[in-house]
Image (cartoon, rainbow, N blue to C red):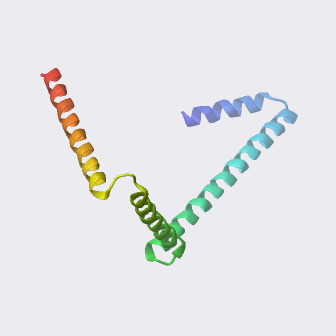
Amino acid sequence: MNQFLRLLFGVGLALTEPRERHRVYRRVSDKLDDLADQASRGYDTATERLENVYRAARGEDRTVLVSVTSFVVGVGVGAGVGLLLAPASGKETRDNIADRITSFKSDMRDRMRSGEAKTA
């Protein structure tokens, strides 16, 4: 198929005027240069990202470690402040969460059972 397309392209160019042929060659050449530049930029970006991952995996890139540590500390502080400012006591909050989880489990079991009954 590729050879057929090249043949058609060649025949089309042979039938065009020399001036028009030059314009087509120039356009095709420009497009190929653009594609080569884009591929080169993509390769450079991918290489840079892989180098960053490699450095982070080896512990050489401290920015990733600092970001993860900051996130974990932020989550901990947020959870602590949430518990301090919660309108219910800790026991009431834990009981409420446990009740919701139990209710969710039983709802899922009921749905699974009704789904099994429909397929049977």
Q: Judge by depth and name the residue closer to the eye, 93 or 118.
A: 93
What residue is shown at x 50% (from left), y 78% (from top)? Answer: 60
Outermost residue, left side: 120
Judging depth in this view, the residue of 104 and 33 nearest the camera is 104
Outermost residue to the bottom: 60
In the image, residue 105 sits, relative to residue 73, either above or below, namely: above
Is 76 drawn above or below residue 14 in the view shown?
below
Is residue 89 left or right of 115 when viewed as pictured?
Answer: right
Relative to 80, is 96 above or below? Answer: above
State the residue in front, 13 or 34: 34
* Quarter of the figure with residue 120: top left
Residue under the point 16% across and 22% down: 119
Residue 41 relative to residue 63: left or right: right
32 displayed left or right of 86: right
Q: Residue 90 falls in which quadrant of the image?
A: bottom left
Q: Position of residue 85 (x, y in %)?
A: 43, 57
